[in-house]
Amino acid sequence: MRYIGNKTRLLPFILEAVTSLGLGPGAAHDACAGTAVVGRELKASGWRVASSDIMSYSYVFQRAYVVAQRVPSFAELRAGDPELRRAMRSQRFRAALSRRGPGALSAVCEYLSRWLEPERGFIAAHYAPAGGRMYFTDENAMRIDAIRTRLHGWHSEGLIGDDGFYILLAALLEAADRVANTAGVYAAFIKSWQPNAKRAVDLVPRHPVRGARGSTAHLADAEKVASQIGPVELLYIDPPYNSRQYAGYYHIPEVIARGWFSDVPVVRGKTGLIRDSAGTTRSAWCSSKGAERSLRDLLAATEARHVLVSYNSEGVLNEIALRRVLDDAAIDGRSCRFVREYRRYRADRNHAKRRYRADALRELLYHAQLR
Ligand SMILES: C[S@@+](CC[C@H](N)C(=O)[O-])C[C@H]1O[C@@H](n2cnc3c(N)ncnc32)[C@H](O)[C@@H]1O
């Protein structure tokens, strides 16, 4: 999924730092998991990972990419869903579904993407033209509604287990994001249909990584989880860097992840934000004072031997403050820093001809051995 702060491109940099420090593999806590790519990579490298985040869509990714060990067989589903059995009259589909593992997963995704009748539900009512917003075409919104409703039905009737449910729901979140009519985040929709938005929703499954058993997912604040999971070798922290709350930028993936079956989200405003009366999706890391306090509290709560913090040169917490907190928590009073420079290209709107300005951005990874 397109996600602010996603570390996919920086995985080699992070893993190189872990190796050069001579860490693990052992137990790790990916404290601000987001799309769960870091936890997934650590698991693939032999780590047992506890991951956490305050957003429900992240919990879905954590379950699908970090906790799940293998593709389920979908045996109950084959036997239990009458509509799926109708689709199985097609020989090609039946053969694909009977294949164990990845073949069956692809067949279920194909069924959800192509065979299911679109239906008008929550997404069509609020995030498509029929609901006055243009995040999805009416057709795609109705497909997302139908798929999300069917996944809820299959899961609550026991036709798919937790692994199958979260793997398919993660595929839906990624598929919906590919056809979202946005510039990357859901803070606004674009007022004309972009080419990607006109394509049909298509679920492309990602297969679970097999690794050490016992990886866990947590829909909770990083500090709370750190204090619950006990000793770990490595705490990896990749917090929000700036004042943008993820809850405001990814409210639609959040709705899709949570569903609308028992708790119906209350939608408001031009962009259809959802009400968070308990304040559980508001992050203290989004202000400089809050970030400093959160880092201090997280380091006090963890029983990790080492901490790695990803931070970017434009973050709300300045480097002096960040280093001070890390140095205070370090066993020898010192933290160190790994640096990766890369270029970000930006359209220069002031120029008549479209020219691009290259900004040097530094991705910083701080390390401290903890007391
Ligand atoms: C920079 S992103 C992480 C990106 C992630 N490493 C990836 O590659 O996708 C920051 C994440 O921190 C989460 N977050 C914010 N406050 C948090 C808190 N108090 N506890 C846990 N996660 C939090 C946000 O929801 C967001 O997913």
Image (tube, grey):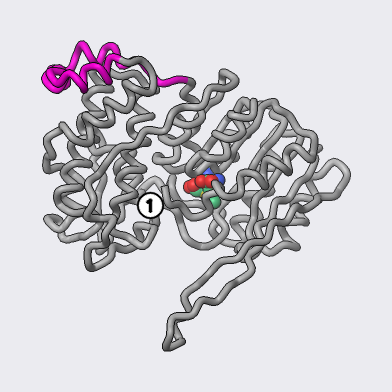
Please tell me whether mark 1 sits on a helix, a strand or a loop: loop
Q: Quadrant of the C terminus?
A: top right
Q: Residue at x 45, y 20 (%)?
A: 70
Which residue matches tag 1? 250
Vertically, is 83 above or below 174?
above
> Quick one: 312 or 109, which is closer to the camera?
109
Where residue 172 appears, as percent x and y from the top left, is 31, 38
The magenta segment: 70-98
Specify the quadrant of the image occupied by residue 168. Answer: top left
- Amino acid carrying label 1: it is Tyr
342 sits left or right of 178 in the view: right
Q: Residue at x 43, y 52 (%)?
A: 2
104 sits left or right of 85 in the view: right
Where residue 252 appears, as percent x and y from the top left, is 31, 49
Residue 294 visible here: yes
Q: Residue at x 78, y 44 (%)?
A: 368
Q: Residue at x 35, y 15 (%)?
A: 100
Vertically, is 267 above or below 109?
below
Is 94 magenta? The answer is yes
User: Residue most toward the bottom?
Assistant: 352
User: Residue most toward the right?
Assistant: 332
- Main SS of the magenta part reads helix
321 sits left or right of 204 in the view: right
> Quick one: 12 or 326, which is closer to the camera?
12
> Quick one: 330 or 256, which is closer to the camera?
256
Is 158 magenta? The answer is no
Where residue 97 appears, as percent x and y from the top left, is 27, 19
Where residue 323 appears, as percent x and y from the top left, is 76, 56
User: Residue most toward the front?
Assistant: 92
> Quick one: 157 or 17, which is closer to the camera?
17
